[in-house]
Image (spheres, rainbow, N blue to C red):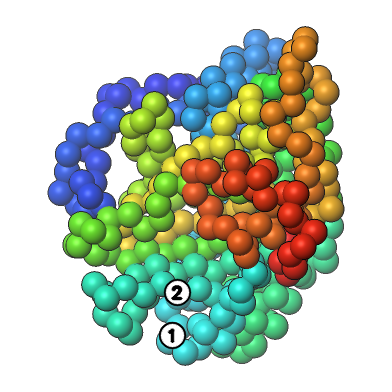
Amino acid sequence: MATAKHENGAVKAMENGGDSTETKEYLNEPFIDLAEFMNGDDETRARACELVRDACMKHGLFQVTSHGVDPLLIREAYEEVDSIFGMPYEKKMVAARKRGAVKGYLGTFDENFSSKVPFKEIYSLHYSNVGSDSQVTDHFKSAYGDLLPDRTGKVYERYCEAMKELCGVVMEVIAMSLGVDRSHFKEYFKDGGGILRCSLYRPCDNSNLSIAKGPHSDPVCITILHQDQDGGLEVLMDGKWLVCQRRPEAFVVNLGDTFQALSNGKYRGCVHRAMVLKEHERRSLAYFVVPNRDKTVKPPELIFGEKEERKYPDFQWSDMFTFTQIYYTADTETLNRFIAWLPNKDSVPAAEDA
């Protein structure tokens, strides 16, 4: 059943990213049962759409359960996070990310940590909905050769396929909540894909480093996120940071800047931040859903009210990608800064692998 409220309304959350506690409020985002949505009656779907609409207008985030993704696959995906980041640093750097690119390894160091160990590590790869059935296994073989077992590529191949399927259902929910044809966004993203990002945040008891990733909204359309048991995601609403609930059986869905433009500002790109814990590592699996690089980002006509004006100009996804990969680090003003940058886009080089 779709629910919008946590039973306690508050949580013992991590203070300054640590394990000592203070009372922080939950975001109280809705949990949407996708099996009920797909198989239920019109009243059930209408209620789910109402909850999604309310959340997306307020803060841009909801969660989904009964999504059909095998829990064993999720566990295996986390195990392969450990396989990648457990390698010696010099071996991880064999696939170091290049400037302007998505794919590859990136480690962030800080003087408050051991100089030999990055406090934040990410590995990213691009997945195409119309690519080959072995595109991810081929990616890892090309990136790391025999440094990683074949299992790593096979697990993430299956995980990306599962995210592709989940995205299709989520897009139906969002479309219906906006009042457009149920298949509109599913078709729009049919020839698109996603960016899979595996992240590891090491513990730190320095309060100055409690925030692993500062306030920002993702520049993509939507992000499908799985948090490990330690969570760490916080969302900004009405000037207050609220804790995103941790449910191992759920996926977090948060809207990005590109979807804010696709909805003509009716739905908000979710402003959020990631926290570091004092005593525990935290890991996450994020799948950033993106259109085909040449797709025009333009809201469907059906969402416009009488005499409603366009808030954002049409643009191609490749332009947003280039802007955020090369010229601007995502923050809370990314969309506005991107719109201001657009008139000058023809004078700058494009990013590599949107």
Q: Nearest the camera: 282 or 112?
A: 112
Amino acid carrying label 1: it is Tyr
In the image, residue 65 lies at what x, y percent? 54, 35
To which residue does mark 1 refer?
89
* Vertical comparison of 133 with 343: above or below: below
Q: CA distance from mark 1 to mark 2?
A: 9 Å
Instruction: Indicate the position of residue 189 as horizontal and vertical percent values.
Output: 78, 44
Query: Is 25 placed above or below 73 here?
Result: above
Q: Is residue 258 above or below residue 4?
A: below
Contact? badges 1 and 2 (CB < 8 Å): yes
Relative depth, front residue between 261 and 182? 261
Residue 102 in view (yes/no): yes
Taking the spot 82% from the left edge, 44% from the top edge, the residue there is: 296
Local crowd at mark 2 within 10 Å, few (<14), some, or many (≥20)?
A: some
Label disc, if present, on residue 107 of the rendered structure: 2
What element does badge 2 sit on?
strand
Q: Amino acid type of disc 2?
A: Gly
- At 74% from the left and 16% from the top, the residue drawn is 308
Camera-nearest label, 1 or 2: 2
